[in-house]
Image (spheres, rainbow, N blue to C red):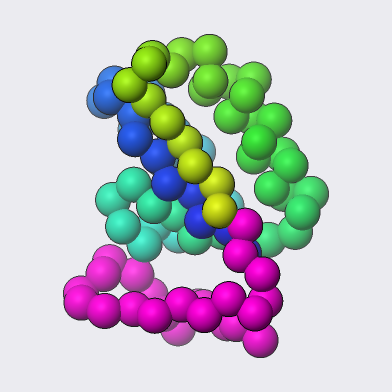
Amino acid sequence: MVLVSYDISDDKLRTKFSKYLEQYGGRIQYSLFEISNSERVLNNIIVEIKGRFEKKFTQKDSVLIFKLSATCTILRFGYAKNDETDLIIV
């Protein structure tokens, strides 16, 4: 599983980026997506970020990708906009 977090200042670019990520995973917070997929899918996402989005970023923009291992523990508090029924950690 990976978490993709982003901070993009341009509204139009931010919307395109979030719609792109929705193809691969679910939004768990406004600028945070959870993607449960293979290494190949992650590599495709990275290529797309570099080829399509990165050239449009300004000095204020950033995207962080966190790779989580099977041994990671996720603790959830509050009223996050997520659907925990789809999350399976073995």
Q: Is residue 82 above or below residue 3?
A: below
Left or right: residue 50 versus residue 27 is right
Q: Is residue 29 visible from the viewing direction of this image?
A: yes
Residue 31 image position (x, y, % from top left): 34, 47
Q: Residue at 33% of width from left, 21% of height from top? A: 60
Q: Residue at 61% of width from left, 65% of height from top? A: 68
Q: Residue at 39% of width from left, 52% of height from top? A: 32
Frontmost residue, 32 versus 21? 32
Quadrant holding the N terminus: bottom right
Residue 74 image position (x, y, % from top left): 46, 77
Left or right: residue 52 versus residue 29 is right
Residue lying furthest left: 79
Quarter assignment of residue 67: bottom right
Q: Which residues are magenta?
A: 67-90
Q: Is residue 24 above or below residue 60?
A: below
Membership of 77 in magenta stretch:
yes
Residue 37 image position (x, y, % from top left): 68, 61
Q: Is residue 79 above or below residue 9?
A: below
Q: Is residue 22 visible from the viewing direction of this image?
A: no
Frontmost residue, 29 versus 21? 29
Residue lying furthest right: 40
Quadrant holding the C terminus: bottom right
Q: Main secondary structure of the magenta part?
A: loop
Query: How many callouts does the rendering have?
Result: 0
